[in-house]
């Protein structure tokens, strides 16, 4: 099978340069739905939603990470993701994610009108992504 054309990917979080390298494909979730990016993709700026970032470096070379909100810019030269938070599966604290899930579920079941339900729903989605990804390692 022929190798696909590669492009530069850079993923940056407030704490670190999370990933930088040449890749064949990137898949992630945006607020408009899932997107897959190959070299020569049309220029685009979009909002990244909580989800799994799949990086294809080459044939049978996949990396997955939890990406929890941010922005993505696609240019002719590269793809840049500015993420609020990024974690490789081995970096995820499963106990903390399970506790966050339980808290979010309690808030969503609550009848307290002072609880921000959208924020609780987002917290639940983030914890489920972490738990799912950590379970794959």
Image (spheres, rainbow, N blue to C red):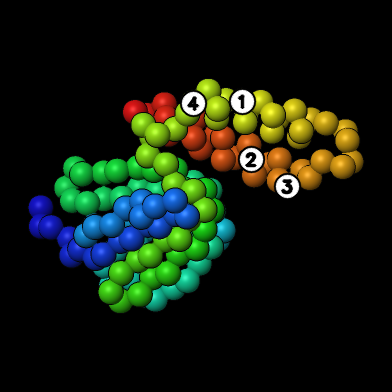
Q: Which mark is residue 94?
A: 4
Quadrant including the C terminus: top left
- Label 2, on which residue? 123
Between marks 1 and 2, how big is the CA–CA gap? 11 Å
Nearest the eye: 54 or 81: 81
Q: Which mark is residue 117?
A: none
The tag earlier along the polypeptide, 2 or 3, is 3
Classify residue 1 as left or right of residue 131: left
| CA distance for labels 4 and 3 | 23 Å
Q: Position of residue 90 (x, y in %)?
A: 36, 31
Category of crowding for the residue at label 3, using alpha-carbon neighbours closer than 10 angstroms: few (below 14), some (14–19), many (at least 20)? few
Residue wearing tag 3: 118
Q: Position of residue 126 (x, y in %)?
A: 56, 40
Q: In the image, which is nearer the foreground, mark 4 or mark 3? A: 4
Q: What element does badge 4 sit on?
A: helix
Q: Earlier in the sequence, mark 1 or mark 4?
A: 4
Inspect this view and state whether residue 32 appears. yes
Which tag, 4 or 3, sits closer to the chain's start? Answer: 4
């Amino acid at each position: 099978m022929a190798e696909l054309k590669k492009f530069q990917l850079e993923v940056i979080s407030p704490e670190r340069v999370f990933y930088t390298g040449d890749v064949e494909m990137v898949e992630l979730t945006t607020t408009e739905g899932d997107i897959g990016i190959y070299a020569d993709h049309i220029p685009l700026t979009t909002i990244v939603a909580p989800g799994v970032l799949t990086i294809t470096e080459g044939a049978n070379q996949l990396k997955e990470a939890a990406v929890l909100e941010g922005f993505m810019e696609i240019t002719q030269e590269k793809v840049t993701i500015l993420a609020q938070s990024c974690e490789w599966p081995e970096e995820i604290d499963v106990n903390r994610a399970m506790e966050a899930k339980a808290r979010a579920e309690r808030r969503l079941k609550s009848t307290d009108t002072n609880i921000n339900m959208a924020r609780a729903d987002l917290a639940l989605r983030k914890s489920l992504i972490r738990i799912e990804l950590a379970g794959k390692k």
